[in-house]
Image (cartoon, helix red, strand yellow):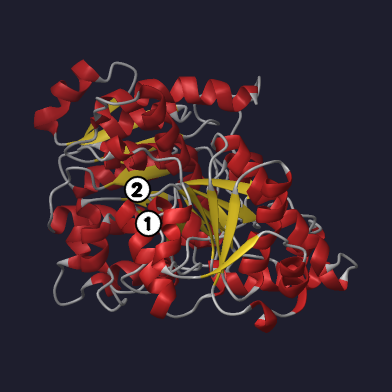
């Protein structure tokens, strides 16, 4: 199989913008002729539309802050009141202190305007949180903290404007102990990382993305490097068989591991034309009885393993699931990297190097850097869970947010890193990163990591670039888990992949 170096494909529509990038997008829109008043009007109307779509008519209390987020709240209040809703606005500060577009729209509000205090929560059945959004950089304090504390304690339904107040937009981590827990959130133009990263994803509730008139051309000017992991991110790179394809052009994947069955089956379902399981001779009969369409390759020692990956037209390898921690696994990983075979390193393949003394993880990172597969754009994927990550990347601050840690790990290792979890982050050495949002909670089950490694390996074997292959594998696994539903075990996942792919190719 012939691999070629890859160039990242421009992506539109699934970008995640940092707080500063969103501010620049607003500024670019205004500089391009879209009035700020118009943007705020569209944002507030989108909030009102979301309220009407989700809830029947009831008393609405808008908590308005002193900035543009509060201005959005005034617009929403005006639209709802104009349609007969009972609306009150509670303002943090004085109306005379509002400035710019927020002052203009506050002046258009002719209804009740109350000072912000915990007691005003008695005047509403539904709260619109328009206090701070993404503009806040410090913990909530004073009367705002008191009101939010009461809001959370009462469990009142709440729609947040842009972001729940008290949540950091770039990290998804609360700025302090007090933060709004929203039923739903309306954000504008593009999502922010906090809408997907945990615990922000849980604090935001259901997220609606509204078009408020910012030109799409602003994205080209910003050139963001963070994305939501959606098919539009990697669809152009996803392998599709041609009429002249055969098993070798579709890629030969080798799975090495003492628990290789799930990874092998997932690699097959991902489309690899041929999957071989490299296993000790004494268990070959067990694999052969279960994996009827896979090739079982007994490997008695390292020399046999090297012959397999060098002489059987191997396009990709998965090493780690159930391999055991020790010298044999270390040697297999180094052999794959030395041979320049694109690979997925999971589980024991990671812990072996984390525990390896005196070389430590540096030996693995040096081997990745020296591998001929680096000419393919970094064709090595590491798939640690949080515990494995902490052992392998000891000098990365564990208190940093997940996006920051995954990016740092990708730079340090030279590999694409999938930091697994409910909000899996896929990061590439070149700075690109994607946050996954389709994984259900019941995907947390033993063996799911083996399936993910096999999916990524199967896509690598078909010449899909490493970053896109990792992102696609994470999304496919989440979609398969959601399709199966509660009661899922890892064995169920490979069988759901064809159904997910059928819908994927149909759309």
Q: Earlier in the sequence, mark 2 or mark 1?
A: 1
Q: Please, what secondary structure does the residue beneath circle 2 have?
A: loop
Q: In which quarter of the image is the N terminus?
A: top right
Taking the spot 55% from the left edge, 49% from the top edge, the residue there is: 60
Q: Is residue 29 above or below residue 155?
A: below
Residue 198 rendering spot, x and y as whole percentages: 37, 56
110 sits to left or right of 275? right
Residue 325 at x, y percent in the picture: 13, 55
Q: Mark 2 points at which residue?
A: 422
Q: Quadrant of residue 502?
A: top right
CB under 8 Å between callouts 2 and 1? yes
Q: In this view, does 351 lie to the left or right of 98?
A: left
Q: How crowded is mark 1: few (under 14 residues within 10 Å), some or many (20 or more)?
A: many
In what element is the residue under mark 1? loop
Real-space Cα separation, disc 2 to disc 1, in angstroms: 8 Å
**Of the residues tagged 2 and 1, which is closer to the observer?**
1
Q: How crowded is mark 2: few (under 14 residues within 10 Å), some or many (20 or more)?
A: many
Looking at the image, which residue is at 20% across and 75% down? 359
């Amino acid at each position: 199989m012939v691999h070629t170096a890859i160039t990242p494909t421009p992506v539109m529509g699934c970008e995640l913008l940092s707080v500063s990038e969103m501010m620049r997008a607003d500024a670019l829109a205004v500089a391009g002729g879209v009035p700020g008043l118009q943007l705020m009007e569209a944002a507030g109307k989108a909030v009102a539309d979301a309220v009407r779509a989700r809830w029947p008519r009831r008393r609405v209390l808008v908590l308005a802050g002193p900035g543009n987020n509060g201005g959005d709240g005034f617009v929403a209040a005006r639209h709802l009141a104009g349609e007969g809703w009972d609306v009150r606005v509670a303002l943090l500060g004085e109306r005379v202190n509002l400035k710019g577009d927020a002052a203009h729209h506050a002046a258009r509000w002719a209804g009740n305007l109350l000072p912000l205090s915990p007691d005003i929560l008695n005047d509403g059945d539904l709260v619109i949180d328009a206090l701070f959004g993404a503009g806040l950089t410090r913990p909530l304090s004073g009367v705002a903290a008191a009101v939010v504390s009461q809001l959370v304690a009462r469990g009142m339904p709440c729609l947040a404007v842009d972001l729940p107040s008290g949540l950091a937009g770039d990290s998804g981590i609360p700025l302090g102990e007090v933060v709004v827990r929203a039923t739903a959130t309306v954000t504008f133009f593009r999502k922010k990382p906090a809408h997907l990263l945990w615990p922000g994803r849980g604090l935001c509730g259901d997220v609606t993305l509204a078009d408020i008139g910012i030109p799409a051309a602003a994205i080209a000017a910003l050139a963001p490097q963070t994305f939501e992991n959606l098919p539009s991110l990697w669809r152009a790179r996803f392998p599709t068989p041609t009429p002249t394809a055969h098993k070798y052009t579709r890629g030969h994947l080798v799975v090495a591991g003492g628990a290789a069955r799930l990874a092998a089956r997932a690699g097959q379902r991902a489309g690899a034309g041929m999957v071989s399981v490299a296993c000790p001779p004494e268990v070959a009969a067990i694999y052969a009885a279960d994996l009827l369409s896979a090739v079982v390759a007994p490997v008695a020692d390292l020399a046999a393993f090297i012959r397999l990956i060098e002489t059987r037209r191997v396009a990709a390898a998965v090493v780690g699931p159930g391999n055991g921690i020790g010298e044999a696994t270390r040697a297999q990983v180094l052999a794959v990297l030395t041979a320049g075979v694109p690979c997925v390193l999971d589980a024991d393949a990671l812990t072996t190097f984390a525990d390896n003394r005196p070389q430590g993880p540096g030996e693995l990172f040096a081997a990745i850097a020296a591998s001929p597969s680096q000419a393919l754009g970094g064709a090595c994927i590491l798939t640690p869970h949080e515990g494995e990550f902490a052992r392998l990347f000891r000098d990365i601050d564990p208190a940093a947010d997940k996006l920051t840690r995954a990016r740092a790990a990708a730079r340090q290792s030279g590999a694409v890193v999938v930091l697994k979890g409910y909000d899996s982050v896929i990061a590439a050495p070149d700075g690109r990163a994607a946050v996954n949002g389709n994984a259900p909670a019941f995907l947390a089950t033993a063996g799911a990591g083996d399936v993910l490694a096999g999916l990524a390996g199967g896509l690598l074997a078909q010449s899909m670039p490493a970053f896109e292959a990792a992102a696609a594998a994470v999304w496919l696994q989440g979609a398969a888990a959601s399709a199966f539903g509660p009661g899922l075990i890892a064995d169920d996942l490979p069988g759901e992949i064809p159904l997910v792919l059928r819908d994927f190719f149909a759309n």
